[in-house]
Image (cartoon, coloured by chain):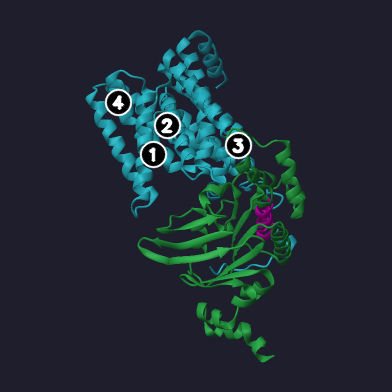
Amino acid sequence: MLNSITEFITALGKYDFLQSALLTAVMVGVMSGIIGSFIILRGMSLMGDAISHAVLPGVAIAYMLGINILLGASVFGILAAILIGFVASHSKIKTDTSIGIVFSAFYALGFILISMAESTTNLHHILFGNILAVSDSDIMTTAVVLALVILFVSIFYKELLVTSFDETYAKTYGLKTQVIHYALMLVLTLVTVSALQTVGIILVVAMLITPAATSFLWTDRLSIMLYLSAGVGVVSSVTGLYLSYTFNWASGPAIVLVAAMLFAVSFVVSPKQGFLFKKRTRKTEVEEGLKYETNID
Amino acid sequence: MIDIRDLTVAYDDTPVFTDVAVQFNAGKITGIIGPNGAGKSTLIKAVLGLIKSQEGTVTYNDRPFSEVQKKVAYVEQRKELDLNFPINVLDVVITGTYGQLGLFRNPGKKEKLASQEALKQVSLEEFASRQIGNLSGGQLQRVFVARTIVQEADIIIMDEPFVGIDLQSETAIMKIMKQWRDDNKTIIVVHHDLNKVSKYFDDLVIMNHGILDYGPTARVYNAQNIEQAFSSDLSDVLFEEEVGS
């Protein structure tokens, strides 16, 4: 074990491709942890999964036309978000059903487009990630997305907080909550595309929700949750990368399994869950002698 | 004054009420009562623009209501919130300043002080750093009242604020509502506990798929209206003392 770690570190010093992989893994870990926190707090895990699958046709078309993947993916990610919202609000169909229909259709379309583009190796990489084959331009793009994510969250932190916590209230004071929603969907799409390189389309959702859910178990404050979640994302990515390099595992599954392990450990030992340690106060009804009344309306 | 004219709201072609006309006065606490499904919450949600109305206008001092949205504070029924959200009491109150801050400005020292002051008014200052899930129903409701205080709104709309809370909290909230009334704000409260109607509300709106009657509580809250809106049994129970004496 120790041996393989030293070997990994020596290899890091020697090989450019491994350095690129590490850099990308760290950046993707940070951005998916941050955006993922908002996704899980808004109860949008399924939406995160949907958007990540729905970008596939965009990726395929970008390949065919030789344009930047981010551009193609963004168009389809946002299109999917709008369609999901449209179907849900203009029919009696519930949102989860609407998500299921739209994302599977987009995914299917993407699959066919990719096979038309005749690049089977690429398809495999897109689906499962190939962090060891990151190009310099990929790193640049990932850095730009990371900067965008950090800017977006710092500028609109209070809007993201209030719409995640109490959307109705935000509407009543006049905030355009729909704009915040679609802006978040756009940023989510960009993060998804960056995460394609490390974990692949199928497992992107794990990078979004697992580190965020892990950090949620450890803190009661949103700002701390964002940092923690980014940290858990980085640790998962880097450890996964090490496993991937050492045992020749696919990078995506390796990273995702590490994230899941961290979650499992937190689930057992974190104070919020209280399996091992009980939290100091649960409810204060007792202190106050609260009467319970059922709401008759 | 909030002036509602010809308001019609329907869910999927089934009208909740049609052509509702009612006024809410400044400097008054107005209660809205009526049986389950009478359209009380629907009325205030339509006023707030949270649900679409098919017809009608809502104005505040002759301006369309949507133009005065920043002057509105809304306290919804608590059951609709995620109490596990990673946020503490003080930060919830600070969200009350977001509307005035607008985009690109973040709450600073001034907003924090105002929020602490508001928490003091509802006697929750020692709970400032507690996660909101670890409060009792009454404490939580007082947190939202504190948020409403820092909003400095002219119109305050509360949906069932007293449901499932302790008497101490109820009294504290009522006291603050009376302060708002003295500041000439417009206060609207959806309410279900008929016992305290005369004690709490200056004006009253009685609904049952439309407005049955509205005006000063002393005039509107009578056996006949309650019988029409609810049932003769309820009306008998509530008004028998007066009849007997």
Task: Say if mark 1 contacts mark 3, CB within 8 Å.
Answer: no
Tell me the quarter of the picture where residue A262 sits.
top right
Q: Colour of chain B?
A: green
Q: Residues within 10 Å of mark 4 (few under 14, many from 20)?
A: many
Residue on which disc 2 sits: A189
In the rendered image, residues at marks 4 and 1 fall on the same chain: yes
Marks 1 and 2, Cα distance to the nearest angstrom? 10 Å
Chain label for disc 1: A
**Picture layout, residue A216 above or below residue B118:** above
Give the overall secondary structure of the magenta segment. helix
Q: Are marks 1 and 3 on the same chain?
A: yes
* Circle 1: residue type: Ala
- The residue pinned by badge 3 equals A225
Q: Which residues are magenta?
A: B134-146
Numbered circle sitting on residue A60: 4
Mark 4 vs mark 3, CA separation in Å = 35 Å
The secondary structure type at the circle numbered 1 is helix
**Residue pushed farthest left?**
A116
Q: Amino acid at mark 3?
A: Met
- Please state, as top left, top right, bottom left or bottom right, where the N terminus of chain B lies in the image: bottom right
Q: Which residue is mark 1?
A: A81
As displayed, is residue A125 above or below residue B234?
above
Chain label for disc 2: A
Residue B53, image x, y percentages: 43, 57
**Closer to viewer: mark 2 or mark 3:** 2
Q: Residues within 10 Å of mark 3 (few under 14, many from 20)?
A: many
Q: Earlier in the sequence, mark 1 or mark 3?
A: 1
Determine crowd level at label 2: few under 14, some 14-19, many 20+ residues with C-alpha closer than 10 A: many
